[in-house]
């Protein structure tokens, strides 16, 4: 016993105490627990199990479980954090008594046994059930809940042993899918093994093995309950509300693969599914993660985002991972071809964006068309839906809501170095900062160099090897924060605060710098200064490739501190040990509760830690502001169809008519009942008359028998609606009616006098109407003066007003651009003639801004280096890349617009620019530039070296590729040895060749879908 006690006290001696007294205390505690008998030691020997009797007289091993040492000394299981109890159960390998006690206790907690008080550390309603909740029972044992807990491996082994002994096979019997309570029958052990359930759900064993490689071997209880009891296995729609990192993605993956696999088994034509995500980064990440699982079932996965995609045709099994805009275009295409029945499932992640004023209407319109024209099943998921019942009523869906988090979240307020628990905000009597109740105080370890102590707060986590996300209010603030922290962490004069970095980590940070240096535009000087110290920044000003590299480095623990804007919380799945919100503001706005929960929800890394920490930094005068941010309820999810006047409603009506969903006014009203707006506003039809009048007046629609038009009465049954050629072209191209009018006007003028002496005129027609870029007018004026004569002729042809440009440059020099009430002298008289003439000035300003973007796009397709373009137009690389993607998409829309109007000459000219804008180059390098790891600059280098096609690149020698790329790609960085440079060169050459071969394979599959 003495030897066992000494070994068991090892962890306590190392972690929990120090010095001779600590060692002796740990040893004596272990020895006392060993000699006490009747119980047995748990993990590290820190606690003991004392068997006792329950009041009913039945022996219960969890009735008394007392910790003998450590932070929770003297506490029983009911007083411990739930994650700590789960960890205890999972860390014991040879103490079955402890496993039995802990699992028994967790079973009682799940059962909600009377007489037991709730755990003070327990998450509130950690497994909160919704309207589709289920009671799991054992036949012959009343309503006693099943004991859950322990590590997945240990629990699975115990389950197999008991099932083998009792010969009892687990079985679920779901009764009525429409009932709010489903009774299920199962064996004496409730399995959470993913392999077991994937088999029952009809998934291949290879899929379970892919999950296992990703570290997922077991399910959470709520996931099993949701899938088995919500009706989604029987085709019912579902609204799923669960916190960030709770495991919603696993539910959608299972449903996607199961539905397509079942369609393949039954040879059904409904073998396609769509996964709709809000951001390109999420779509890109999901496409890569879903492909290995889907390939095990011979299911194709295609990404539709940022110019990527392909034909969504045929009947072969396919999952389309797309952004909201791409998803709407795909559904429109299917409806035009009358193929919408091929959709079996539509999954919408981040469904709360229906309330977004910029893009929410498009998501609502997408779902309304799916509900009205298909039999597809719909799954909507979100972590921040406060009224899922409205969404469920609209979609005719069940609701499953849980507050479960795999790890606890501790929320704090940080003010002047004091760490206060967030629950103090809920005290109505506490109207000022209660510094006396601070949990702890963070000292100024960096002195006056760190006035708000953000460096000290990040350093606490960094010295323990933990990651920290710092959310800042603006892009410039993220860069400043990263450089500030790197300066603090890089101090060498004070050894007390120096962070030891292993040679391996230092080498990996240099590898990140090398990857960034090979990105288009080269290595950012700020990142070059911050990454060696373990800090970096992340915002939309970086390119997609740069952000991906930084995200991967942060996930791998190479970058420990990442300063980011609020968009990262919604657009990237990037958890961290500690989250710091440096201000309760985002830009000039106060942080709302939804964005706060998205940011704080990133705290905690599942499987690596038992708790995540979130800190909101405030000033001493912002206590009330902290209350409004952290305690405010989530905003209600509302429809945005009327948020911008009647403009969005017009688009919905036009699309319904063009796709044949509303041939008459009565059917139009029926379609409008398929919207969320109808659920929340039954009086929405009062807006219908004005929207129809506008569409008819602008020649998008024509009404037959309009004299009997009466929206409120049944006479609208005899009123038929037809779309004109302009209306059909607008919908087919994916443009809004207002955009369609402007594109139609520009193209009509161009048909009469298109200037082809330079590409600028065509590029102007293909420049997005709404781009959000405001030029630097002083620089703009200087550029226009120096333009060649043919481009100046084009500027005059499209309507660039040089007088207005000069006036804007002067106003910009004064520091106030477009002050309120100020009008250029040229337009003052016109403004007084008619109240409508203000549109003339607005239109002229739009043309000015649009032509500025046109000049930037012209430089890109002429293969100007991106760093030169950024410098010339005062834009970040990320902004240029975003504009390039928008222009490529818009050019495709304009091309479709022309084809629907039978303007074939313009259609041919416009379509030739789509790929050029996508890659940013001339026509001769387009095929090479689309290969992964190549792009335009390297494509030109390969072309000049004689490698002029993808086929030639796929069979080229490594040395030939290296020689071609050496002049445009920095192989030698940070003084590597010649041997390492040669290794890097060969590695890049192999990647380029492999990318060429994969590209050829994708092209071949697009022509022959049966090619594996």
Image (tube, rainbow, N blue to C red):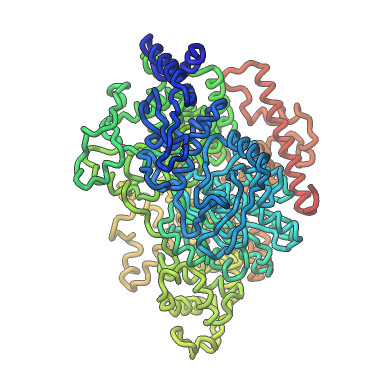
Query: Where residue 908 sits in the image (x, y, percent)?
Result: 68, 61
Query: Where residue 880 sits in the image (x, y, percent)?
Result: 52, 45
Residue 913 occupies which quadrant of the picture? Answer: bottom right
Q: Nearer the viewer, residue 1009 or 107?
A: 107
Above or below, comparing residue 711 to residue 330 in the picture: below
Tell me: 362 left or right of 954.
left
Query: Where residue 904 sits in the image (x, y, percent)?
Result: 68, 66
Tell me: 179 left or right of 946.
left
Query: Where residue 857 sits in the image (x, y, percent)?
Result: 55, 49
Above or below, comparing residue 401 to residue 105 in the picture: below
Q: Nearer the viewer, residue 288 or 597?
A: 597
| Residue occupying image coordinates x 58% and y 51% | 252
Res. 469 in view: no
| Residue occupying image coordinates x 19% and y 41% | 432
Q: Nearer the viewer, residue 678 or 44?
A: 44
Q: Residue furthest top?
A: 20
Above or below, comparing residue 909 to residue 158 in the picture: below
Res. 564 in view: yes
Tell me: 204 left or right of 498.
right
| Residue occupying image coordinates x 46% and y 40% | 58
Q: Nearer the viewer, residue 924 or 899?
A: 899
| Residue occupying image coordinates x 61% and y 22% | 972
Report the number of discs. Answer: 0
């Amino acid at each position: 016993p003495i030897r066992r006690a000494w070994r068991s006290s090892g962890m306590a001696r190392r972690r929990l105490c120090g010095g001779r007294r600590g060692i002796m205390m740990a040893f004596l505690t272990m020895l006392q627990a060993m000699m006490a008998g009747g119980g047995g030691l748990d993990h590290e020997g820190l606690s003991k199990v004392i068997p006792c009797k329950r009041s009913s007289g039945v022996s219960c091993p969890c009735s008394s479980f007392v910790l003998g040492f450590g932070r929770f000394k003297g506490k029983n299981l009911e007083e411990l954090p739930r994650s700590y109890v789960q960890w205890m159960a999972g860390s014991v390998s040879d103490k079955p008594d402890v496993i039995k006690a802990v699992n028994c206790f967790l079973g009682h907690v799940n059962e909600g046994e009377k007489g037991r008080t709730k755990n003070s550390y327990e998450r509130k309603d950690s497994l909160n059930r919704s309207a589709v909740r289920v009671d799991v029972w054992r036949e012959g044992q009343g309503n006693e809940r099943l004991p859950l807990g322990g590590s997945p491996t240990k629990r699975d082994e115990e389950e197999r042993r008991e099932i083998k002994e009792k010969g009892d096979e687990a079985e679920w019997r779901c009764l009525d899918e429409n009932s709010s309570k489903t009774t299920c029958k199962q064996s004496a052990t409730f399995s959470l093994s993913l392999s077991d359930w994937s088999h029952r759900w009809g998934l291949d064993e290879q899929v379970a093995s892919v999950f296992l490689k990703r570290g997922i071997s077991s399910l959470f209880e709520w996931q099993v309950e949701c899938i088995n009891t919500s009706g989604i296995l029987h085709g019912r729609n579902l609204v799923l509300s669960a916190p960030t990192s709770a495991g919603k993605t696993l539910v959608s993956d299972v449903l996607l693969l199961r539905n397509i696999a079942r369609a393949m088994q039954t040879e059904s034509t409904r073998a396609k599914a769509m996964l709709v995500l809000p951001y390109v980064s999420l779509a890109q990440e999901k496409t890569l993660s879903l492909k290995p699982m889907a390939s095990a079932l011979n299911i194709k996965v295609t990404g539709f985002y940022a110019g990527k995609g392909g034909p969504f045709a045929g009947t072969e099994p396919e999952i389309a991972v797309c952004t909201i805009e791409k998803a709407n275009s795909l559904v429109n295409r299917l409806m035009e071809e009358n193929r919408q029945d091929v959709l079996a499932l539509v999954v919408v992640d981040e469904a709360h964006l229906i309330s977004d004023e910029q893009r929410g209407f498009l998501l609502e319109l997408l779902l309304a068309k799916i509900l009205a024209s298909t039999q597809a099943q719909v799954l909507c998921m979100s972590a921040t839906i406060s009224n899922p019942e409205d969404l469920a009523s609209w979609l005719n869906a069940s609701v499953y809501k849980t507050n479960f988090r795999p790890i606890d979240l501790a929320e704090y307020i940080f003010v002047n170095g004091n760490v206060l628990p967030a629950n103090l905000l809920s005290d109505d009597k506490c109207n000022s900062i209660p510094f006396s109740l601070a949990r702890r105080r963070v000292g100024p370890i960096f002195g006056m160099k760190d006035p708000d102590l953000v460096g000290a707060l990040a350093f606490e986590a960094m010295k323990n090897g933990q990651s920290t996300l710092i959310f800042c209010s603006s892009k410039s603030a993220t860069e400043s924060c990263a450089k500030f922290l790197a300066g603090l962490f890089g101090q060498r004069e004070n050894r007390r605060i120096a962070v030891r970095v292993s040679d391996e980590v230092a080498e990996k940070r240099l590898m990140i710098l090398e990857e960034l240096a090979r990105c288009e535009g080269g290595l950012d000087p700020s990142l070059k200064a911050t990454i060696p110290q373990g800090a970096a920044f992340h915002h939309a000003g970086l390119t997609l490739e740069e952000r991906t590299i930084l995200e991967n480095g942060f996930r791998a623990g190479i970058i420990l501190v990442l300063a980011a804007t609020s968009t990262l919380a919604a657009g990237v799945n990037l958890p961290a040990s500690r989250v710091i919100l440096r201000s309760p503001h985002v830009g000039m706005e106060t942080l709302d509760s939804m964005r706060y929960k998205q940011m704080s929800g990133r705290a905690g890394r599942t499987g690596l830690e038992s708790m995540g920490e979130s800190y909101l930094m405030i000033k001493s005068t912002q206590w009330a502001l902290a209350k409004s941010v952290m305690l405010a309820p989530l905003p209600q999810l509302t429809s945005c169809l009327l948020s911008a006047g009647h403009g969005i409603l017009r688009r919905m009506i036009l699309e319904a008519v063009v796709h044949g969903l509303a041939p008459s006014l009565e059917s139009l009203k029926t379609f409008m009942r398929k919207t969320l707006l109808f659920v929340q506003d039954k009086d929405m039809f009062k807006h219908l008359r004005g929207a129809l009048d506008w569409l008819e007046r602008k020649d998008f629609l024509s009404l037959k028998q309009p004299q009997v038009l009466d929206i409120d009465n049944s006479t609208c049954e005899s009123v038929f609606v037809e779309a004109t050629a302009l209306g059909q072209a607008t919908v087919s191209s994916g443009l809004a009616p207002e955009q369609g009018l402007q594109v139609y006007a520009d193209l009509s003028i161009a048909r009469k006098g298109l200037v082809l002496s330079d590409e600028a005129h065509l590029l102007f027609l293909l420049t997005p109407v709404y781009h959000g870029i405001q030029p630097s007018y002083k620089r703009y004026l200087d550029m226009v003066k120096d333009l060649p004569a043919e481009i100046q002729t084009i500027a005059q042809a499209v309507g660039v007003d040089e007088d207005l440009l000069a006036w804007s440059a002067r106003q910009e020099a004064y520091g106030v651009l477009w002050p309120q009430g100020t009008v250029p002298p040229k337009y003052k008289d016109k403004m007084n003639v008619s109240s409508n003439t203000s549109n003339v000035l607005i239109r002229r300003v739009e043309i000015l801004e649009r032509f500025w973007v046109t000049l930037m796009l012209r430089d890109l397709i002429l293969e100007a280096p991106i760093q030169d373009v950024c410098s010339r137009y005062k834009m970040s690389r990320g902004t240029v890349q975003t504009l390039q993607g928008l222009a490529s998409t818009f050019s495709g829309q304009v091309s479709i617009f022309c084809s629907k109007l039978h303007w074939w000459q313009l259609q041919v000219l416009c379509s030739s620019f789509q790929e050029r804008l996508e890659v940013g180059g001339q026509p001769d390098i387009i095929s090479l530039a689309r290969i992964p790891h190549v792009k335009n600059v390297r494509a030109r280098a390969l072309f000049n070296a004689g490698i002029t096609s993808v086929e030639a690149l796929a069979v080229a020698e490594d040395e030939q590729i290296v020689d071609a790329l050496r002049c445009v790609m920095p192989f030698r960085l940070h003084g590597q040895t010649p041997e390492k440079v040669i290794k890097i060169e060969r590695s890049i050459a192999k990647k380029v060749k492999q990318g060429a071969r994969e590209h050829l394979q994708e092209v071949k599959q697009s022509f022959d879908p049966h090619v594996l």
